[in-house]
Amino acid sequence: MGSFRRKIANKFKNRYRLILRRDDNLEERVSIILEPLNFVLILCGGGLLMGSLVYFLLAYTPLNYIFPTKSAKYSSQEQYKMIQKIDSIEIYLEQIKIQSEVLGKVLSGDELSMDVENNSSPKEVQAPDVSLKEPSKKNIQRSTKTTNYSFFIPVSGVISDSFNIQRNHLGIDIVAKSKEVIKAIQNGSVVFSGWTSKGGHTMIIQHSNNFISVYKHNAVLLKKTGTFVSAGDAVALVGNTGELTSGPHLHFELWKNGLAVNPCNYLNF
């Protein structure tokens, strides 16, 4: 047993030289002296350093949420907050999807009667409470058929053409004086403010609860894309722009969950 130990000890004490030479002229470039014992110590040190780095990344960086360690403990409040964030992201993506669909339909002017809300109410997607500031109650016209929402009347005037699925008229036409102020029906963000050939100067506003309002044939647009507006804010002026118009009026559309709905079911004109 003693001789075996000595042989092992001698092998660990043996010295080796690692030489790197150029291939073309065999010129010596690097020469390193290695010992088995030192080599083992370097490997152990490198493994310890790598293990410490991995532990640090898992314990003190966002990777901890992806690869939780046994020592990671989250309070019920932290877990609830993470679930809320995930739900908010899912709802936001659903709103973006609906918004893109409506924008494509409104701006393309294609036949959309198959997507129009019928007598049965569509399945609603619950939107997060964005804590929008409530407008003055005296300026709000509440619907007699739908009591869950409060909207401003966009402009005062006479309805000359109603919502009609058969004619693919997915809104109402309100005749008003030229340059009359048009108001936002509810708090929201302007997702489109520009020119379309059929609708002229057109504005589209995204509201909470997956509502989208559309204002066409305006003379002037007062808000730019990306602007936040409050209920009752002036957003445009009545005009006669675009191909599908024969006089100063507002063509107003209301969409919910990606479906065109009759504005008269939600606003008292």
Image (tube, grey):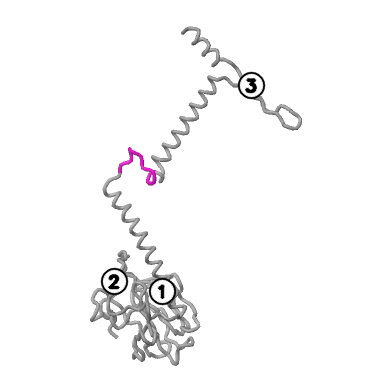
Q: In terms of secondary structure, where does tag 3 sit?
A: strand
Task: Please say whether residue 72 is one of the residues in the magenta stretch.
Answer: yes
Query: Residue at the location (60% across, 17% down)?
Result: 15
Camera-side mark, 1 or 2? 1
Q: Is residue 131 magenta?
A: no
Extreme residue in the top direction = 2
Query: Residue 125 is drawn in which quadrant?
Result: bottom left
Q: Is residue 124 above or below residue 76?
A: below
The amino acid type of the residue labelled 2 equals Glu
Q: Is residue 139 visible?
A: no
User: What secondary structure is found at the residue carrying circle 2?
Assistant: loop
Mark found first going from the N terminus, 1 or 2: 1
Q: Where is residue 199 shown, x and y percent of the image?
A: 46, 83
Q: CA distance from mark 1 to mark 3?
A: 74 Å
Please give the range of residues in magenta: 64-73
Q: Which mark is residue 217?
A: none
Of the pair 246 and 25, the residue shown nearer to us: 25
Residue that label 3 marks: 17
Q: Residues within 10 Å of mark 3 (few under 14, many from 20)?
A: few
What predominant SS class does the magenta segment belong to? loop
Q: What is the count of numbered marks?
A: 3
